[in-house]
């Protein structure tokens, strides 16, 4: 154990944030899965807690072993992984399990599932970070940028789009930001944005003419219209939003205390999409702000690592995966407090889920790997200064 502890390196604040979020995750999931336990596990409320505890513990193990790998190795690993992720996305469209009118996961043995968009999202970010810093790629040239940056982004987002519009939109926004920071020419980014808008308009047209091609189109348009115009709210959308508001309002300043949520019995997906509303109900406004601050601290530490990253690849890699986690968290929390339409995005490192937590753990491990290398260089420079 002492040997393992001695090998824990990287930003200690990020380690602390991960541990605190994991504790909140375990408490919130245990509290919010009571209805599931009585429906599927004959009232065994410990079942989901123990399952989630295993997922979190394995996530910590993933972080530990990932952060031991030198971050430069990820450059080659995830270049290959992208060419695995794309076929898996295509496979999911054909044989994926149908959840909420969308094929998002691949079935695995032992009644397990694998969400391929999580793999695609992480690999695309790392692929772009590598492409943006390769000396043999002239990103100032539109043709080169198109084949090495724009085309992979477009392919992955298009493949995710039919089953999960919000994930595709969030991933596109992250890639857009990464290209901007990576100094891709603004007029090239503008051309790419125009291409995406044309593809999106074409997809909407196809979805309206042939609903069977994009069965989720009606759900997306309904959610956006109901958010913009309350008179057009469907009964389902209204119910979700209202139950979330009740949970937040009843939490008050200090909340009802852990395990005392009542809205977990009425709120759809209180253990994933709307877990932030349950946290506010049980821990109050103070608890909600504390969770928000944890993600902001995580982003602050990411920016700090970026400014000190030893190489451009390390900087873009850290920003890409760090911004991805925090941006998704902000979207989830904004939905819970009715600042955005319902998206179905989990709260990273808190919501119940397997692949979501594990790929978030890989992202954290990558950030810590870059941080570890920075610490090594600082220590080395300190040694040279004293000799």
Image (spheres, grey):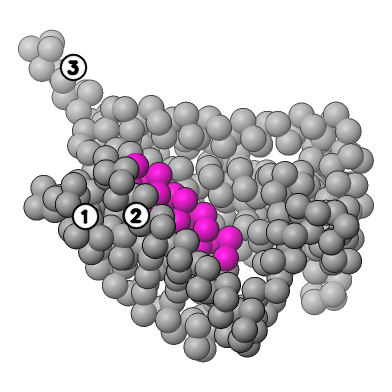
State the mark number for residue 191: 2
User: Residue at 50% of width from left, 62% of height from top?
Assistant: 168
Does the magenta segment cover residue 382?
no
- CB contact under 8 Å: marks 1 and 2: yes
Does the magenta segment cover residue 176?
yes
- The residue closer to the viewer here, 17 or 335, is 335
Mark yes or no: residue 343 visible: yes
- Residue 262 location in percent, x, y? 92, 52
Q: Residues within 10 Å of mark 3 (few under 14, many from 20)?
A: few
Q: Quadrant of residue 196?
A: bottom left
- The residue closer to the viewer here, 248 or 57, is 248
- Residue 134 location in percent, x, y? 15, 50
Q: In terms of secondary structure, where does tag 3 sit? A: helix
Gap in Å between the C-alphas at discs 3 and 2?
47 Å
Q: In terms of secondary structure, where does tag 1 sit? A: helix
Start-end of magenta stretch: 165-180
Labels 3 and 1: the sequence-earlier one: 1
State the mark number for residue 142: 1
- Residue 239 location in percent, x, y? 88, 60
Gap in Å between the C-alphas at discs 1 and 2?
9 Å
Gap in Å between the C-alphas at discs 3 and 1?
43 Å
Is residue 228 placed above or below 201 in the rendered structure?
A: above
């Amino acid at each position: 154990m002492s040997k393992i502890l001695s090998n824990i390196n990287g930003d200690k604040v990020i380690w602390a944030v991960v541990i605190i979020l994991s504790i909140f995750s375990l408490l919130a999931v245990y509290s919010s899965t009571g209805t599931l336990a009585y429906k599927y596990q004959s009232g065994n409320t410990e079942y989901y807690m123990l399952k989630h505890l295993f997922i979190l513990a394995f996530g910590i193990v993933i972080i530990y072993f990932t952060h031991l790998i030198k971050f430069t190795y990820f450059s080659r690993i995830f270049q290959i992984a992208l060419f695995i992720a794309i076929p898996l996305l295509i496979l999911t469209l054909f044989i994926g399990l149908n959840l909420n009118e969308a094929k998002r996961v691949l079935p695995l043995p032992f009644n397990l599932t694998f969400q391929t968009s999580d793999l695609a999202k992480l690999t695309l970010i790392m692929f772009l970070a590598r492409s943006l810093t390769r000396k043999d790629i002239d990103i100032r040239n539109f043709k080169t940028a198109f084949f090495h940056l724009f085309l992979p982004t477009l392919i992955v987002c298009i493949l995710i789009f039919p089953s999960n519009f919000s994930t595709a939109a969030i991933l596109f926004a992250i890639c857009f930001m990464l290209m901007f920071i990576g100094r891709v020419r603004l007029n090239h980014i503008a051309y790419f944005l125009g291409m995406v808008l044309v593809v999106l308009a074409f997809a909407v047209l196809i979805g309206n003419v042939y609903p069977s091609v994009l069965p989720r189109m009606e759900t997306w348009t309904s959610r956006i219209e109901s958010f913009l115009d309350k008179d057009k709210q469907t009964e389902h959308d209204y119910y979700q939003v209202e139950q979330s508001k009740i949970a937040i309002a009843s939490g008050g300043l200090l909340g009802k205390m852990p395990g005392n949520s009542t809205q977990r019995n009425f709120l759809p997906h209180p253990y994933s999409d709307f877990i932030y509303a349950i946290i506010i109900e049980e821990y109050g406004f103070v608890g909600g702000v504390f969770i928000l601050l944890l993600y902001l601290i995580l982003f602050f530490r990411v920016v700090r690592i970026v400014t000190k990253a030893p190489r451009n690849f390390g900087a873009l890699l850290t920003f890409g995966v760090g911004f991805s986690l925090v941006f998704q968290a902000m979207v989830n929390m904004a939905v819970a407090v009715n600042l955005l339409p319902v998206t179905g995005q989990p709260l990273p490192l808190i919501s119940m889920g397997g692949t979501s937590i594990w790929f978030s753990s890989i992202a954290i491990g990558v950030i810590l790997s870059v941080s570890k290398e920075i610490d090594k260089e600082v220590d080395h420079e300190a040694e040279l200064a004293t000799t």
